[in-house]
Image (spheres, grey):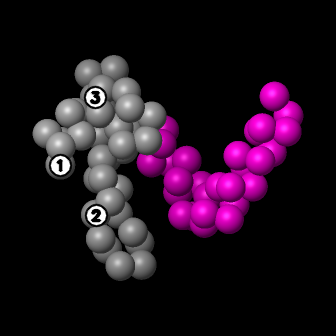
Amino acid sequence: LFSDQAGCCAICGRHQIEFKQNLHVDHDHTTGKVRGLLCHQCNHGLGNFKDNTSLLFKAVEYLNANI
């Protein structure tokens, strides 16, 4: 997975060498399926939105309306 992602976070694209921690293995908490490797910030961002795509889309709309 690390090689497939070229050592980068699957969301922000930053390389692992930019972080103090290793990339985190992201998984679906319902199915347990591994989705990819994420940096700490992106992993927690998804967790804070509880993997709810509706809330994530609303957050994008909010940001776009208030730039």
Q: Which mark is residue 16?
A: 3
- In the displayed structure, 31 sits above or below 46; it is below
Q: Which mark is residue 1?
A: 1
Task: Point out the image quarter for the C terminus.
Answer: top right
Residue 42, x across and y down, in percent: 48, 42
Q: Nearest to the eye among marks 1 and 3: give it.
A: 1
The three-letter amino acid code for the residue at tag 1 is Leu
Q: Let me know if residue 15 appears in the view.
A: yes
Q: CA distance from mark 3 to mark 2?
A: 18 Å
Q: Are marks 1 and 2 in contact (CB under 8 Å)?
A: yes
The residue beneath circle 2 is: 34
Q: How many marks?
A: 3
Compared across the picture, whether 9 is left or right of 3 comes to: right
Residue depicted at x 41% and y 72%: 29
Query: Is residue 23 located in the magenta-colored stretch of the structure?
Result: no
Category of crowding for the residue at label 1, using alpha-carbon neighbours closer than 10 angstroms: few (below 14), some (14–19), many (at least 20): few
